[in-house]
Image: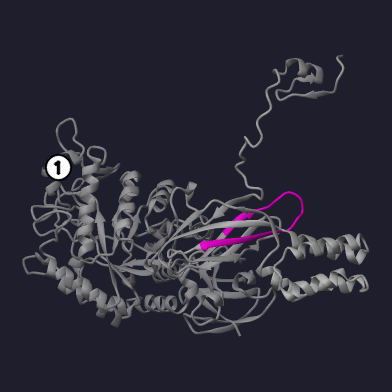
Amino acid sequence: MASGWCCRDTVGVVATNDERAAAAPAPQPAPQANAFEPRIGRIPIRFLSPESPENRWPAKAYAGEVVPFGATVFREGHDALGVELVLTDPTGVQTVRRMRAGDPGTDRWLAEVQVDGVGDWRWHIRAWSDDWGTWLHNAEIKVPLGQDIEVVFALGVQLLKRARRRRIIADAIKTLQNRELPPESRLSAATDSRVAAALEADPIRSLVTTSPQRVLRVERSRAGLGSWYEFFIRSEGAKQRKDGSWQSGTFRTAAKRLPAVAAMGFDVVYTPPIHPIGEINRKGPNNTLTAGEHDPGSPYAIGSKDGGHDAIHPELGTRKDFVYFLRTAQANGLEFVMDLALQCAPDHPWVTEHPEWFTTLPDGSIAYAENPPKKYQDIYPLNFDNDPIGIREEILRVTLYWVALGVKIFRVDNPHTKPLAFWEWFLTEMHDRHPEVVFLAEAFTRPAMMQSLAAVGYQQSYTYFTWRNTKQELEEFFTSISKETSAFMRPNLFVNTPDILTEFLQFGGVPAYKIRAALAATASPSWGVYSGYELIENVARPGAEENIDNEKYEFRPRDWAKAEAEGRSIAPYLTQLNRIRKEHPALHQLRNLDVHWSDDDAILVYTKYLAEDYTRTGEPDGIIVVANVDPHSVRETTVHLDLTKLGLPVGSSYGVTDLITGAQWTWGTDNYVRLDAFHEPVHVLSVRYD
C-alpha cells in the first residue's frame, strides 16, 4: 500500500495523498491581492424584507400602513451585533431606527415603521460589530469570577475613549481606572443607565457593513384600504313595460342609490362596463346563445355601432350624465370604479378598423373567446402579439380618457389572459403619469400569474377567498396573504361576484352570508360585496356557480326598502361591520393578522393588533375574531390565544367586548366559547386595555 493518508474522494473511490499529488494539475500563479470581490459583506446581511419576488419591482405599502422591515444579520463567533434601518422618504428626509432581535436562534432583526408620505421610499440595513456590547457581556461574566480584571477594565477604557466626549463617559472612564475601588463598583460604572443611554444613541462600532438598497413604493391609502360595493347601473331604476321590453336604468336613476350605499359604510362603488353592448351573437338570459328582442346582453361584450371602450351606452345616458354620477358619488364620500374589460364584441369598431388586433382562423373568421368547455361567442379577445405597440397605445389612450373625466380606480377584467409584459409596461406608464390611479386585478388564476400581476404593479387583487371555507383552508389562506405575499400583493376579499355563487353560500343560508362578510371585513383592509348579497340571493343556475337569472344578461331591479322592512336584508349587519372597520385601526392593516388555536375543527380564531404608537388616540387597538365556519351547527369549544400577539403579558386577564352583540367578558389565554350559527356565528371582540 502506498504511503500517505487514505481518504475517500468525491466519487467514492479510495485514494491516497501520494496518488492525489500525482494526479494534481500543475501549480498556478497565485492570484493578485484583492482580485477576489466577495458577494457577502464583512457582516453578512441577507434576506431583506419587504421585498418583491426576485427584487425586480418595488415592494408595496399604502399611506398609514405599518410596515415590518427585517433582515437576517449574523457573524462568526459570539461577538454582539448592532443593526439599524436607514430609511429615506420621498422628500429626501432620512431617519435611522435601531432594529430589535427576533426569535432566539433565527438571527432575524426587525423594525416596524408606519409610512405616510406617498412615493418611493429607499431603505437599507446597516450592521456593525457592537464592541461595547461584546465587552460588557464578557465583563459581567469575568469580573464576578475575578478573571483578568485589570485587562478587562483596560479594554473597557479603550472602548470608552472611542465614544463621543460626554461627561458621563469621562466619569465612567475614571471609575473603571480607579484601582482603589472594589471590582464590582468599577463595573457598575459601565452598567450605569446613563452610560447605556449615551452608547445606545451613539454606539461604539467597528466592521460597519451596509446592505444593498431597496425601494418601498407607498401609494395612497385607497390602494390598500376600502369597502367596495358593486351594482349594475342599468338595473337601478329599470322598469318593465307592458310589451315586455325594458326601460333601462340610467346614471341619473342609479345616482339615487348612492346615499344608501354610503349609509351602509361603503366608500367605493364599482359598476360593470358602461360601454355600448354588441348586438352580434348577443347572449340571452342565463347565458343562452339566442337573445330576445328586448334582452340587453352582457356588458362585457363591449362595442357596437354606438362606439367602443371610450363610449357610453346610450341607454345609460350621456357623458354629462356620467360626470353627474361621479360627482354624486364623491358628494356621498364614495370613489367610483370603472371596469376595464379588454375584449370586444364582434361589432366593436376595432374589429373593422384594426382586424390585425385579433386572431384570424384558417376559414377567415375571427376567433371568439373560449376556455373549454366554456365559450363566449359574443366576445373577441385581443391578440397582443400581432400588433403589441398599436394595442398598448390604444389601451393607454382609452384609460387616460376616463382618468381625465375623473376616474381614479379601475377593476380590470381577466388580466391573466393578457401578456404580463404588457401589464408591466402599462402599469409603469400609468404610475409615471398618474400615481394616484389604482388598478384591481380580477385574476382568478394560478398562483404564479396572480402573484406576478401584483408584483408588476397591480395595487389590488382578487384572490381564492371565495373558495376557502373550512377552518384549515382559511388558516392557510390568511397566513399566506398576511405573511407570505403581503410585501407586493394586496387582497381585496370580495364575498361574491356576478360570476361566483359558491356552494357555501347556496346552501348555508343567512349564517353563511354573515360568516363570509365578517371574515372578509375583518381579515383584509379591502373587501367587497356584489349587490343582492344583502338580500341572500342564493339560488344558482343549474350546473353553474352563479346566480340564476344572472344580472349580467338581464335587468334586475330590486326593492331595497321593502326587503329591509320585511326583515329579508342583512344590510344592517354589513353596516355594522363597516362601522367596526372605521372605528378600529387594527383592521386597516393586513400584515398584523395572526392565526391562533381552538379545540374545534370549525372554530377559526385570529387577531389583529395595532400598538399605541400607530393609533390616533394613543391607545392600543386589539381585535379578536372567533368564527364558527360551519353555518349549519352550534359549536362549543375552548380557544387558545398567544397574548403577546395582542400586546398583553403572558398569563394576563383582560376585558373583551363583542362589537356585534355588545356582550362583555373577562378573558385570558384559554377561553370557552359557544357560537350558534343560527344566532350570531362570529364574535368580533375588542380588547379593553385598562
Amino acid residing under circle 1:
His
Q: Which residue lies furthest to the left in this view?
A: 243
* Secondary structure of residue under mark 1: loop
Q: Is the magenta stretch mostly helix, strand or loop?
A: strand
Q: Between residues 335 and 4, which one lies in front from this camera angle?
A: 4
Percent x, y of residue 111: 58, 64
Q: What residue does disc 1 label?
A: 354
Around disc 1, counting alpha carbons within 10 Å, would you say few (fewer than 14), some (14 to 19), or many (20 or more)? few
Can residue 534 be seen by looking at this rendering? Answer: yes
Percent x, y of residue 289: 17, 49
**Is residue 523 shown left or right of residue 176?**
left
What range is drawn magenta here? 70-87
Residue at the (45%, 66%) spot, across then down? 524
Residue at the (26%, 38%) spot, across then down? 385
Residue 84 inside the magenta-drawn segment: yes
Please identify the quadrant where the N terminus is shown: top right
**Is residue 259 shown left or right of residue 130?**
left
Can residue 596 be seen by looking at this rendering? Answer: no
Colour scheme of the rendered structure: one colour
**Is residue 643 shown left or right of residue 623?**
right
Residue 29 inside the magenta-drawn segment: no
Does residue 649 sit above or below 210 in this rendering?
below
Residue at the (21%, 74%) spot, across then down? 327
Q: Between residues 259 and 6, which one lies in front from this camera angle?
A: 6
Please identify the quadrant where the C terminus is shown: bottom right
Give residue 161's quadrant in the image.
bottom right
Q: Between residues 560 and 338, which one lies in front from this camera angle?
A: 338
Give residue 382's quadrant in the image.
top left
